[in-house]
Amino acid sequence: MITRLLVLIFGYAYPAFECFKSLEKNKVGVEELRFWCQYWILMAFLMVFERTGEVLISWFPMYGLMKVAMLVHLWYPKTKGTGYVYDTLFRPFMARHETEVDRKIQEIKARIWDFIFKYCQHFAVMGQGKFFEMLQYLANQSLKFKQANQNSGSNNDSPRIRTRPVQT
């Protein structure tokens, strides 16, 4: 729990605040913006890989503390690890696999849109069926109501049957 709090503070809150300050300065340098963009790109990919491989890596001793140390190394002003990790590891990897990643993303988007379309189509068919069931129910209730009114109205027009009082 403590390492999660440290990751939250040193991995997200502090870097987000520093990024905010960089953006809001009057004279923002391109290099400073580039640094923070690289940091957030690395953070996003680290989170994706951590979530997918969490079962394999989370059991390492002191994993949480190593993660905190790595995150601090990425943004710490004296080490500026983001530039090194981005330029030596991430950029070459992505340059080699960019077309494959783009193709996979397009496939996933197409699958998601197909799923959404089928789901909406199924929902519309079910909704239409339920709508017609509701209309049928209302029509039946209306018929019952009309028949009840007609029966009670015809009883009022007919002569009443008198009963004899019971003698005791």
Image (spheres, rainbow, N blue to C red):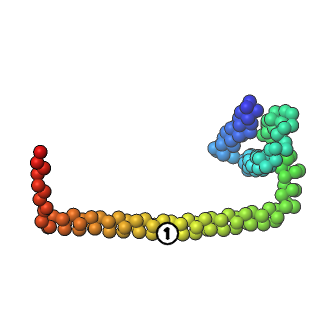
Rendered-image quadrant of the C terminus: top left
Q: Residue at x 87, y 56 (%)?
A: 92
Q: Position of residue 136 (x, y in %)?
A: 41, 69
Q: Quadrant of residue 25?
A: top right
For disc 1, the neighbor class at 10 Å (few under 14, some 14 to 19, many from 20) is few
Q: Is residue 109 shown above or below 42?
A: below
Q: Nearer the viewer, residue 79 or 44?
A: 44
Q: Nearer the viewer, residue 68 or 77?
A: 68
The answer to whether residue 31 of the structure is visible from this angle is: no
Q: Position of residue 55 (x, y in %)?
A: 81, 44
The reply, left or right, for residue 36 in relation to residue 60 is: left
Q: Nearer the viewer, residue 78 or 87?
A: 87
- In this figure, which residue is indicated by the disc labeled 1? 128
Q: Amino acid at mark 1?
A: Gln
Q: Residue at x 81, y 33 (%)?
A: 65
Q: Residue at x 21, y 63 (%)?
A: 152
Q: Position of residue 40 (x, y in %)?
A: 74, 47
